[in-house]
Image (cartoon, coloured by chain):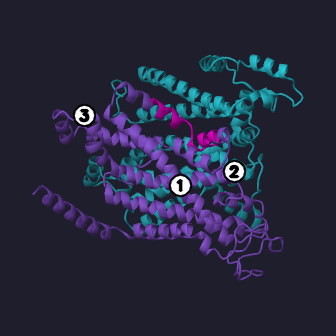
Amino acid sequence: MIQYVRRSLLQVIPSLFIISFIIFILVYVAGDPVTLMLPETATQEDRERLTVALGLDQPFHMQYVQYVTNMLQGDFGTSYVYRQPAFDLVMERLGITLLLAACSMLVAIVISIPLGLLAALYRNSVIDFFISAISILGKAMPNFWIGIMLILFFSVTYQIFPVSGSGTISHLVLPSVTLGVALAAEMTRLIRASVLEVIEQDFVQTARSKGLVESLVLSRHVFLNALIPVVTIIGLQFPQLIGGTIVVETVFSWPGIGRLLLSAMNAKDMSVVQTIVFVIAIITIFTNLLTDMVYRLLDPRIKYDNQSE
Amino acid sequence: MDAKRARNSVGSRTMFHVRKITSFGPHGLIGFVFFSMISLLAIFAPWIVPHDPFVIEATQRLIPPAWMEGGSSTFLLGTDHLGRDIFSRLIYGSRISLLVGILAVVIAGVIGLFLGLISGYFGGSWIDQLIMRVVDAMLAIPTLLLVLVVVIVLEPGLATLIFVIGITSWVQYTRIVRGEVLSIKERDFVRMAKTAGASNKHIIMKHILPNALSSFTVIATIGVANAIMTESSLSFLGLGVQSPDITWGSMLNDGKNYIATSWWVATFPGIAITITVLSITFMGDWLRDFLDPKLKKGGDTNET
């Protein structure tokens, strides 16, 4: 296992370099930050001095080397809007975005596990049809629209939950449900498929044929085995979830990194933008890695010693 | 004789298809009918719309839909905050959505297919390794985030939007095509072509590509729906197509600010997006059953 972890971590390194390269090219193409950073009264000399100070007079590859070196030392640049290190800015707001993501995931799990199980157990029945209809619909609705409709219903018409903002639990409900619904739609389908796969396997038939009560067959044999792929399903939804927070934070004025990203983009505050992209990419990579490991721990059939690419 | 046999086989294949088309459930047909209707509306929009969707009429601001109190029969779905007819704007909005959806998939599809063919055909080689590492890296950045960042670098607009969604969503095509190619190239007819001394280019184009196309078509169809969703999200965030061009996403963004008083402004564009995405999803599901029974439901986007 330790060997497997070590190898996985080693595989992450090239991915990180490619990501840093993609981000670097974007920032490079985005153009000259000097004009944005200086006041309008700045002289040509000021411009040149700042260009040299930022290393922008260097050739492309030297700039990239400098960029990676800085990043390895934890220096992600300074936001020219906030006059603060970009990394600190992002970290301040990351927690509240992850809180939203976690609550959304909780909503999605609570909805999708029972629905997925029901759909699989009563497959090809009216219940199954109904559940899959709901999940197809849930996937087809844009999440920002779901959010606005929830505001319309629960904040405008019935005034149960606040329209926007953060701070209390009631502020958390609508954004989490918005994101959770879309996620649940996807997960329900996958969980249904995963339960169906287990139900058809031999050991379930054996358990049945030895006279075990159906409820015991389900709880002991089907459910636990079907949960193993669910771990992967949950882990793989993560990038989508973070992508979703960007939009949903805008709908509900949720003060996380999604809103920071949009305001940074409008101000062309590229150091903040690149930090956010990089942080999200790192979180995604490690979530995938963690998912993979949990999956391997739960399912002893998978060997981690001699896996091949 | 060869020609005759070929003709026969084409004929029987067509019959086979006709039988299969009718034998699958009605959702494919529903999807197809709705998608055709939306396409027709998009194409003939200037001749169908009851009102000019761009004309601002300050005296007719926020009129409710026709069936509500205060509604007017001239504005079926009401008007927005600038007095523009929502029904006409919805019809115009379909143009951008379909245009972006289809062209973005063409760009992504061409890149994805090309890289997938190369990566799969030379599986295990350094070029395959390189492509797969780039794919991994791209997968670690949520598509929407990547699209947002590229859009801001290139300045928002219609052409940028199509280009950006195209170059950021090829990864899934590469993965699917690569997987297909890896299995196709082990089949006998490819081995025989190789033994016969056919060039790599010939084998890829004549033997592998045609066999990889059906899975690709299914994924590409669903891809149109995803691209429309991404376009709507971007336009909703104000980073997509810029005014005065009409999109459902930007209509929703306008409507958001009037949600407390005028629910209809934000509600109808969302329904339009949902119906469009649903009809494409239905077509895609049906195509999957029809072209490629191997691709089971539930594993389309998350296969690793």
Q: Are marks 2 and 3 on the same chain?
A: yes
Q: Nearer the viewer, residue A176 or B199?
A: B199
Q: Residues within 10 Å of mark 2 (few under 14, many from 20)?
A: many
Residue A97, image x and y in percent?
Answer: 68, 41
Q: Are marks 3 and 1 on the same chain?
A: yes
Mark 2 belongs to chain: B
Mark-to-mark CA distance, 3 and 1:
36 Å
Residue B224, image x and y in percent?
Answer: 49, 54
**Which residue lies under the disc numbered 3?**
B199
Inspect this view and state whether residue A110 appears.
no
Residue span colored magenta:
B133-150
Look at the numbered disc 2 and give the secondary structure of its residue: loop
Q: Amino acid at mark 2?
A: Leu
* Residue A39 occupies quadrant: top right
Tag of residue B237: 2
Mark 3 belongs to chain: B
Look at the numbered disc 3 and give the secondary structure of its residue: loop
Question: Between disc 2 and disc 3, whose residue precedes?
Answer: 3
* Residue B26 inside the magenta-drawn segment: no
Residue plotted at (39% across, 67% down): A125
**Which residue lies under the disc numbered 1?**
B101
Residue plotted at (75% across, 49% down): A253
Q: Residues within 10 Å of mark 1 (few under 14, many from 20)?
A: many
Mark-to-mark CA distance, 2 and 3:
49 Å
Q: Colour of chain A?
A: cyan
